[in-house]
Amino acid sequence: MDTELDNPEYYINRELSAIAFNQRVLMLASDKRVPLLERMRFLSICSSNMDEFFEIRVAGLKEKIALAPAKLTIDGLRLDELYSQIHQKVHLLVEELYSIFNKQLLPALRQENIYFLDAHQWSEDIHLWAKHYFKHEIQPIISPIALDLAHPLPRLINKSLNFIISLSGKDAFERSIDYAVVHAPRSIPRMIRLPSELCGNGHYFVYLSSIIKTHVNSLFPGMEISGCYSFRLTRNSDLFLREEEIDDLAKAVQREVFSRHYGDVVRLEIEKECPTQIIDFLLQKYHLRHEDSYLCDGPVNIQRHTHAINSIDRPDLNYPLLIAQYPPFSGKTERKIFSVMDEQDILLHHPYQSFNVVLDFLRQAANDSQVLAISQTLYRTHSSSIMVDALVDAAHAGKEVTAVIELRARFDEESNLRLANKLHAAGVLVLYGVVGYKTHAKMTLIVRRTNGKLKRYVHLGTGNYHEQTVKRYTDLGLLTCEPTIASDVQIIFQQLTGLGRVVKLKALSHSPFTLQKKLLTHIEECTAAASNGQEAEILIKVNGLTDKVMIQALYKASQAGVKINLLVRGVCCLKPGIPGISEHIRVLSFIGRFLEHHRIYYFRIQSDEQFFCSSADLMERNLYNRIEVMFPILNEACRKRIKNEVIKNYLKDNSNTWEMQSDGSYKPCIDGPYNAQQYLINLYEDKGHAL
């Protein structure tokens, strides 16, 4: 790395950048241009994102501080200083989140006859209904726990709903108890819809927490209750696996997934009305500091509204339904996808174009007597998906089917274990990739006999083979039988499933071997060209940019005069606009209806253009610790589409874009009329035939 570019002032801290991203997400919850129920979803997304931030990033930071609190971060902060800054910023974020919820969203929902009722808002009839519900649905399965020497504070499950009760008096055994804990049953929804006879045509919900708090006296007969307060613990949820010491990865992951529920506590969320004495009691019991507690001016888990919101049938309060277009392949809808691929590459732009094309690619392969083998990587999917059924059918049909499943895909470990068991039972060869590296590449390889010879057909993508998230994420997928690309895909599968030295690839680049080197080579070529007075341009669209090697290469390119546009949705550690360092770099973050997820790398010197798509972001984990793939776009029609639909389109957006300033802050560019995602919705409604 270049020591001249090591100045901490040239970089942004990753954790602080993540908080800033969630602030941008939160802004959509207060954006009146966004349909009301979608605003509630963005509020829930922000809350969910912050859960993961504490479970993984803050938990990991605490472990690092325990070892070396004075160690410096990329921007020159001590780790313990960073910890304090994180909490300062998150406290402000939480205050803003509840302010938006209470002052903007709840009143707007009430205007639409949608109510989330606290106990003080209940009518007499609702009180009677709640009493009956508590007696028959909750009380039989709830277990209050008095806290004394025989009953210490229980190990409460990560992110579960709990109550701490302050009480006095003596129980049946003459015990004097100060506190008790009640754990809300996980089998009961956190928001319960009231029956129509109580609310007419409206949508009325009551909180489980309100029902329990209203009837908590019945759990402690004869005792005096002075307070009952809901709280929630967030625990360290990162899996700890010493893979070199593991004999059976699947069993080890299964053990760790269970342990995750009871990791070290890193955050306490509790009702703001809770007395300081009780908060201090919980902080002391869970070895937390005061800054680790977050006072909630409302439900302690905002994201629990999602299920209720999804149950409300109000299309007028949601985004208009998007019907993903299925390319009719020049009007010949009955043709096999293989025959289309024999003639041309197929570029799919999700969610605007249907993922069913990929599903049909697999289903046709499973039922095609000329197909001999199918190999696929699976990072995030679902064991009951159509895609998995196609793999099972192919195995039952006697084809050689190989699935490389990543068991360590964060928070999808249990789902992937079930998936592995299902495929294994069907006769699929199930492998778990390479020890020490997560398999994040998105690849499918089908070997088919065509005209008496074996031919390879492949799918490569920027996003997961997940039939639900593909409806909400923007991604690109390429179906091709181009010989060099297809051959490289087969080589990578052989590396994943077997042994051997690194084999040089002809078209693809892959982490942890050549992907970063390939990108650096293209950046350096643009840098050299600009230094010689030639026009040079770089556009990179990724989810995150944190790797210092890549950042410094981009700084050098900017110093040489290369025009650089970085479309980084989330975390970005690079600062644009620094005189003499990055004045030729723009950093844009697009936050809209769909989660921006493409990974695109574009390089231009004069009229020579290079287009690549990838599963990899520019983060250390992607470049050094994962199996990732970057693939070139060779077909001219596909290249033109990427240039028009992504590069030109997103640079024009002035409706959902945030531009980073030289101090690392973001300036909203959201008041204009041009929305890049809406342009693509309109484009594919008019041109469903595009390939």
Image (tube, rainbow, N blue to C red):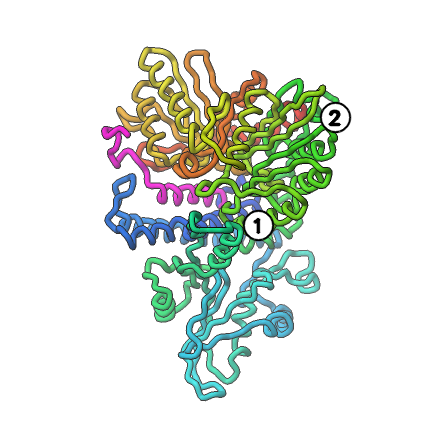
Taking depth in this image into account, of 245 and 221 the one nearest to the observer is 245
Q: Residues within 10 Å of mark 2 (few under 14, many from 20)?
A: few
The stretch in magenta equals: 1-29
User: Residue 568: image x %, image y %?
Assistant: 43, 33
Check whether the beta carbons of the residues at disc 1 and disc 2 lie within 8 A of each other: no
Taking depth in this image into account, of 482 and 47 the one nearest to the observer is 482
Q: Is residue 347 left or right of residue 268?
A: right
Q: Residue furthest front?
A: 500
Q: Magenta-highlighted stretch: main secondary structure?
A: helix
Compared with 645, 109 (above or below) is below
Q: Is residue 14 magenta?
A: yes
Disc 2 marks which residue? 333
At horizontal 71% and vertical 37% (from top left) the residue drawn is 398
Q: Is residue 456 left or right of residue 540?
A: right
Q: Is residue 678 magenta?
A: no
Q: What element does badge 2 sit on?
A: loop
* Pointer 1 or 2: first along the chain: 2
Q: Which mark is residue 140?
A: none
Instruction: Name the amino acid, label 1.
Output: Leu
Q: What element does badge 1 sit on?
A: helix
Q: Which mark is residue 417?
A: 1
User: Residue 599: image x %, image y %?
Assistant: 49, 31
